[in-house]
Image (cartoon, rainbow, N blue to C red):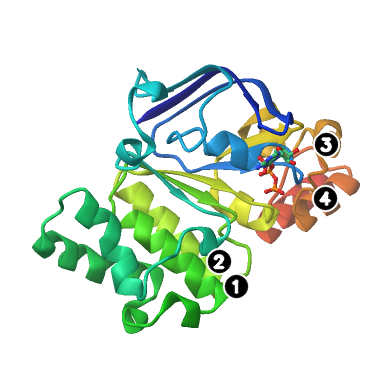
């Protein structure tokens, strides 16, 4: 699937100009991260990918079709958005009902729904909690419930808004597995995150936003090498990258192994 933004501008009813003319193209299945300081416009931009927000000016195209041509409910079959705050998304009495709601709306058969519930619950780690009320889940489990509800719809694009918030190491590992599994199944995952370690471990392409604009867009190695530009957006690279940069390494490293290799190269 292809998402294209052309001179996208968005002004909230309050008068805040959150997006200032963004041009962007995202295609393929390589997971993409969107990063940047609080208020940079990350959530506002991704909410345009399935029409939750509509441009004040400019264009959003999904597979070359204008976003304006369909309702958000219709686009949700193609592009699923997982809300930053699970309480904005969850409204039913059980995890199972949350999983079944969207597919029922789009006419999926009960047989297909049952098969997908089993697979999805296993992927997001909620197989034993399907009959619990979402209010009885921990914050991390609620996040996985919202992710599962969107996976159930089987969209081509999945957008995760801050999925790492409230997760421990195990939660981040599960998110890693979810993103990899979805990629293997031909899906495109676009993820907003403030956790730079998670970002470099999971995403090849990184889009950096600052005050309503995209200021960097490229491979993780290239983006994190732009130290001065990153400072403008208050994005700090992962600690190991910072140490290597502080030591004057020319190569951008993200892992202990890469750090040791760069160190050895320097000592030769
Ligand atoms: N509902 C709203 N009404 C008015 N202004 C808003 C609204 N939502 C966001 N904004 C403003 O739009 C700008 C971009 O906000 P947005 O939530 O998209 O940023 P963000 O990068 O996702 O931030 P965060 O990392 O804190 O979630 C900010 O200045 C914010 O205050």
Q: Nearer the viewer, mark 1 or mark 3?
A: 1
Which residue is nearer to you in this view: 179 or 264?
A: 179
Give me the C-alpha separation between circle 1 and circle 4: 21 Å
**Residue wearing tag 3:** 227
**Residue wearing tag 1:** 169
**Residue wearing tag 4:** 242
Q: Quick one: label 4, few (<14), some, or many (20+) residues within 10 Å?
A: some
Compared with residue 138, is residue 59 higher up or lower down, i.e. above or below? Answer: above
**Callout 1: SS:** helix
**Residue at left offset 69%, top offset 53%:** 194
Q: Is residue 122 visible?
A: no
**Callout 3: SS:** helix
Give me the C-alpha separation between circle 2 and circle 1: 5 Å
Residues under numbered marks 1 and 4 in contact, where contact means CB atoms less than 8 Å apart: no
**Callout 2: SS:** helix
Label disc, if present, on residue 122 of the rendered structure:
none
Q: Nearer the viewer, mark 2 or mark 3?
A: 2
């Amino acid at each position: 699937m292809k998402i294209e933004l052309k001179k996208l501008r968005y002004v909230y009813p309050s008068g805040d100009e959150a997006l200032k003319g963004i041009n962007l193209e995202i295609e393929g299945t390589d997971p993409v991260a969107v990063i940047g300081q609080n208020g940079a416009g990350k959530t506002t931009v991704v909410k345009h990918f399935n029409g939750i927000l509509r441009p004040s000016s400019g264009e959003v195209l999904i597979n070359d079709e204008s976003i304006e041509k369909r309702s958000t409910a219709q686009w949700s079959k193609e592009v699923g958005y997982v809300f930053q705050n699970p309480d904005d998304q969850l409204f039913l009495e059980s995890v199972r009902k949350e999983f079944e709601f969207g597919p029922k709306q789009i006419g999926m058969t009960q047989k297909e729904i049952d098969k997908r519930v089993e697979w999805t619950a296993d992927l997001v780690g909620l197989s034993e909690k399907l009959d619990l009320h979402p209010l009885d889940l921990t914050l991390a489990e609620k996040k996985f419930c919202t992710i599962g509800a969107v996976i159930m719809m089987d969209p081509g694009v999945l957008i995760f808004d801050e999925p790492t918030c409230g997760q421990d190491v195990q939660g981040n590992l599960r998110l890693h597995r979810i993103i990899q599994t979805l990629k293997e199944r031909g899906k495109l995952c676009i993820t907003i995150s403030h956790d730079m370690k998670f970002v470099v471990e999971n995403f090849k392409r990184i889009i950096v936003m600052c005050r309503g604009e995209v200021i960097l867009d490229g491979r993780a190695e290239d983006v994190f090498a732009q130290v001065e530009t990153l400072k403008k957006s208050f994005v700090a690279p992962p600690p190991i990258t910072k140490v290597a940069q502080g030591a004057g390494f020319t190569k951008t490293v993200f892992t202990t192994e890469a750090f040791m290799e760069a160190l050895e190269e320097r000592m030769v």
